[in-house]
Amino acid sequence: MLHHVSIEVRPDDAERVLEFLALIGFEPVDAPEAIAEYVDWVEREGTQVHLIRTPEPAVQHLGHPAFVAPDFVATTAAVRDAGFEFEESRQLWGERRGFATLPGGQKVELMAASPPAAL
């Protein structure tokens, strides 16, 4: 079971990234006091995203977190309406998916459904 993924973000971009995560269903949770001054935590259905605020965040060229957006059309419309870049990609396993770009250039995949379970 995956508990969380961490994404490095510039401090000035943190609020905008939190706005994006809220659009896809994540809600704030308290980070441990010892690290709360430089992280933001959000959670959806038991999975967390930890934003690590740092002046020089790493930006993956290919690596990315992927999230299921159960109402794909409404979610991706809300993402676009909020000013985030979203580009639909080739369907896999017969479901729609695409990539949003966060303010620092990080990519996040949004999927209409999870891939079928492995046999």
Image: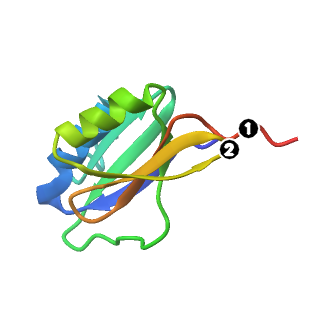
Work out whether residue 116 or residue 11 is closer to the camera in this orientation and state it. 116
Instruction: Residue under label 1, please give it.
Output: 116
Using a 10 Å C-alpha cutoff, classify the residue at mark 2 as few (fewer than 14 neighbours), some (14 to 19) or many (20 or more). Answer: few
- Which residue appears at 58% of the width and 34% of the height? 113
Residue under the point 19% across and 51% down: 14
Residue type, numbered disc 1:
Pro
3D distance between C-alphas at marks 1 and 2:
7 Å
Q: Secondary structure at mark 2?
A: loop
Q: Is residue 12 left or right of residue 1?
A: left
Query: Which residue is labeled 2 in the image?
Result: 93
Q: Is residue 70 left or right of residue 43?
A: right
Q: Is residue 98 above or below residue 103?
A: above
In the image, residue 76 lies at what x, y percent?
34, 37
Question: Disc 1, disc 2: CB below 8 Å?
Answer: yes
- Going from the N terminus, do you reach mark 1 or mark 2 first? 2
Does residue 37 appear in this view? no
Q: Mark 1 or mark 2: which is in front?
A: 2
Depth check: 82 or 13 in front? 82
